[in-house]
Image: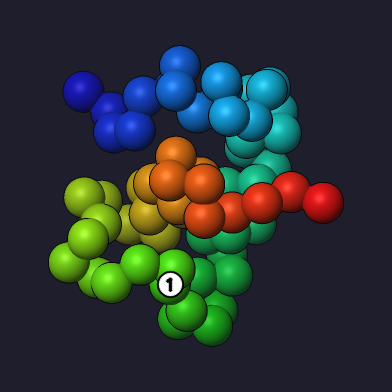
């Protein structure tokens, strides 16, 4: 099972297109700057994409 659930994420973001854009930009930012919103042991995922999805699910990323 994928964590976090796509249904939960779509309730927060609104559209799959917007979710993909937010997560891809955040994952690239994580890879380039090595800056994370949570401690390393708090993440379930090992890859940046999963970590970015987790940050969206915990409302750590806000859209302008």
Q: Which residue lies furthest to the bottom in this view?
A: 33
Q: Is any part of residue 49 visible from this angle?
A: no
Is residue 28 in view?
A: yes
Seen at 52% across and 47% down, the residue is: 59
Say whether residue 4 is left or right of residue 14.
left
- Percent position of residue 48, x then y: 40, 59
Secondary structure at numbered mark 1: loop
| Above or below for 19 versus 22 | above
Q: Badge 1 is on which residue?
A: 36
In the displayed structure, would residue 1 be above or below residue 53? above
Residue plotted at (54% across, 83% down): 33
Decide if residue 28 is on the left or right side of residue 42.
Answer: right
With respect to residue 8, does 25 lie above or below?
below
Residue 57, picture quadrant: top left
Residue drawn at point x = 45 percent, y = 81 percent: 34
Image quadrant holding the N terminus, namely top left
Q: Residue furthest left?
A: 41
Residue 54 in picture, x, y percent from top left = 39, 46
Number of on-image labels = 1
Query: Where in the figure is residue 3, as x and y percent of width and height?
Result: 29, 33
User: Residue 7 appears in which quarter of the rendering?
Assistant: top left
Residue farthest to the right, as pictured: 64
What coloring was used for the rendering?
Answer: rainbow
Q: Which residue is drawn at 62% across and 37% down?
A: 20
> Among all residues in the image, which is located at the extreme front?
59
């Amino acid at each position: 099972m994928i964590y976090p659930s796509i249904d939960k994420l779509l309730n927060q973001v609104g559209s799959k297109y917007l979710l993909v854009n937010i997560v891809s930009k955040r994952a690239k930012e994580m890879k380039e700057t090595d800056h994370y919103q949570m401690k390393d042991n708090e993440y379930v995922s090992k890859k940046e994409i999963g970590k970015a999805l987790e940050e969206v699910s915990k409302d750590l990323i806000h859209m302008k």
